[in-house]
Image (spheres, rainbow, N blue to C red):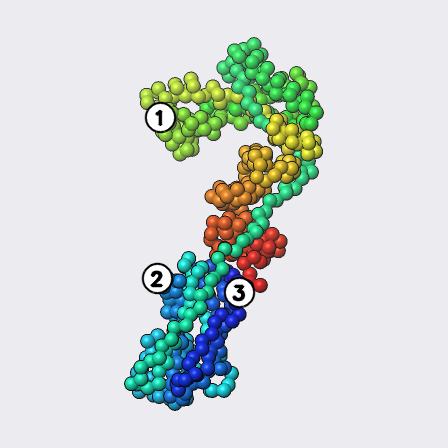
């Protein structure tokens, strides 16, 4: 990116040569036309005017710009400008062609002076920027020669050039937050497990059997809480029965169905649910559940059990392999500690939630955030300053409840980016392939210093018409 500084001095300096010398007389002028700072270089454009210079035909004037610190400790010799009279130019061409003559430093320009006419040379000085250049001197070294045996006439006029302090371009990047669409109907559902105890191979639901009273009281508490909440309307009640994987496979499927129906009938008789909204099904043996609890355990034969479950398709063979592990010790542990928790009824309660205004939503975000839509959460967050803890808290809650929603990931990324947490921001953007995500990734890379990648992402997003990405991209386009 090029920074163009205001032109501080137009006539930077001039040389005045002795009127008494036969080689040349008059003066030349050097004008600073433009000073530019690129990302890694600094560049000057000069114009040298020879209008007032009279140079004899056989002479040559070599003008070499030298850029140095004020104490001459660091310096750059640049390509000279060579000005010759007509005869000297012919002799110089002959020397180059026939004798292979070379200048000490290849000239930027070779000019034949036509005395009495307007002539000028524009040249550009570009070098890698170094800190010392902020206060430096440009010295023009002049060497005049007339013949092979003549000593050069050397002058060292100079003028100090103070460069303006470089300040990196200030960017104003636009990070995008998206406002999630309102939900026309807020549908929610919660799933709970009731580990009701049954007599062996029976499905009668007995309240006073073992600790069933405690379990059923928990069910009552959950249902009453949902039914008494004025913000909710229960729409469906689903019961799913599971059995542990010992005994006959088909018998266990039928047993799970019957136990699910028994639980459903209990709910219907105690809570008066409309039979049109309650359903039940039996899933039979819960091998998935067994795998999960074993994988989370520290059983000695854990890996062997998981291998049997994953790679033995035939159920009866699978059961026999489990029974044979460690001489039956492992199977007895499964029967005692793991199978009982697989015998259960899961019940799912589906309901609709009414819409909330901002003040209601600001209270619910701390007590029942699951009742809020993403749109309502965003509107709550938008009431707080973006750098506040409250703003952060709302987006943290949204990310916890809806971690895979694209709007949540994009907004969480935006928050991280604005707060300088670039790695977290990029992680949230993984898998998102939208103009908004490209833009936010571009802001991230720009703030990390990777302007090339940032520009590419801004352009990609801007080409889709995304207005914020276009604003970001235009900051890199030269006016």
Q: Residue at x 47, y 29 (%)?
A: 288
Give the mark, 3 or 1, whose residue is nearer the N terminus. 3
Q: Which residue is mark 3?
A: 8
Residue 131 against residue 157 in the figure, above or below: above
Q: Is residue 356 left or right of residue 108?
A: right
Q: For marks 2 and 3, give the CA distance.
A: 25 Å
Given this view, does label 3 or label 1 mark the residue nearer the observer? 3
The answer to whether residue 395 is visible is no
Instruction: Rate crowding at label 3 as few (under 14), some (14 to 19) or many (20 or more) other CA atoms within 10 Å.
Output: some
- The percent coordinates of residue 143 (x first, y second) are 36, 78
Q: Which residue is mark 2?
A: 73
Q: Nearer the viewer, residue 464 or 92?
A: 92
At mark 3, the secondary structure is loop
Give the mark, 2 or 3, whose residue is nearer the N terminus. 3
Residue 407: quadrant of the picture: top right
Q: For marks 3 and 1, give the CA distance.
A: 82 Å
- The percent coordinates of residue 447 (x first, y second) are 50, 49
Give the mark, 1 or 2, whose residue is nearer the N terminus. 2
Q: Residue at x 39, y 81 (%)?
A: 61
């Amino acid at each position: 990116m090029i920074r163009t500084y205001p032109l501080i001095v137009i006539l930077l300096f001039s040389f005045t040569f002795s009127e008494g010398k036969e080689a040349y007389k008059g003066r030349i002028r050097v004008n600073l036309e433009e000073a530019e700072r690129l990302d890694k270089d600094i560049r000057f454009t000069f114009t040298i005017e020879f209008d007032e210079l009279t140079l004899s035909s056989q002479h040559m004037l070599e003008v070499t710009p030298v850029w140095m610190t004020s104490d001459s400790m660091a310096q750059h010799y640049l390509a000279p400008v060579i000005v010759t009279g007509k005869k000297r130019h012919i002799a110089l061409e002959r020397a180059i062609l026939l004798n292979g003559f070379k200048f000490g430093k290849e000239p930027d320009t070779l000019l034949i002076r036509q005395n009495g006419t307007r002539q000028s040379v524009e040249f550009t000085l570009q070098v890698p920027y170094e800190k010392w250049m902020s206060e430096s001197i440009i010295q023009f070294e002049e060497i005049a020669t007339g013949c092979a045996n003549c000593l050069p006439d050397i002058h060292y006029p100079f003028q100090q050039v103070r460069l303006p302090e470089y300040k990196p371009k200030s960017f104003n990047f636009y990070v995008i937050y998206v406002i999630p669409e309102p939900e026309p109907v807020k549908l929610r559902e919660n799933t709970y497990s009731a580990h009701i105890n049954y007599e062996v191979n029976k499905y009668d639901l007995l309240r006073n059997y073992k600790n069933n009273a405690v379990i059923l009281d928990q069910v009552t508490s959950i249902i009453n809480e949902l039914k008494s909440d004025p913000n909710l309307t229960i729409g469906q009640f689903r019961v799913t029965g599971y059995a542990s994987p010992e005994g006959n496979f088909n018998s266990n499927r039928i047993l799970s169905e019957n136990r699910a129906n028994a639980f459903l009938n209990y709910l219907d008789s105690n809570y008066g649910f409309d039979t049109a909204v309650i359903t039940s099904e039996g899933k039979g043996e819960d091998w998935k559940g067994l795998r999960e609890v074993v994988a989370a355990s520290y059983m000695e034969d854990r890996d062997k059990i998981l291998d049997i479950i994953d790679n033995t398709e035939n159920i009866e063979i699978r059961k026999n392999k489990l029974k044979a592990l460690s001489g039956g010790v492992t199977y007895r542990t499964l029967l005692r500690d793991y199978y009982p928790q697989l015998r259960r009824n899961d019940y799912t309660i589906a309901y609709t939630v009414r819409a909330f205004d901002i003040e209601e939503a600001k209270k619910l975000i701390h007590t029942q955030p699951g009742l809020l839509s993403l749109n309502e959460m965003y509107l709550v967050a938008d009431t707080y300053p973006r750098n506040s803890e409250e703003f952060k808290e709302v987006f943290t809650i949204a990310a916890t409840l809806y971690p895979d929603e694209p709007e949540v990931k994009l907004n969480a990324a935006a928050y991280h980016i604005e707060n300088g947490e670039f790695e977290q921001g990029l992680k949230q953007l993984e898998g998102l392939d939208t103009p908004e995500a490209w833009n936010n990734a571009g802001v991230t890379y720009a703030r990390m210093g990777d302007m090339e990648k940032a520009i590419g992402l801004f352009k990609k997003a801007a080409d889709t018409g995304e207005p914020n990405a276009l604003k970001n991209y235009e900051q890199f386009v030269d006016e």
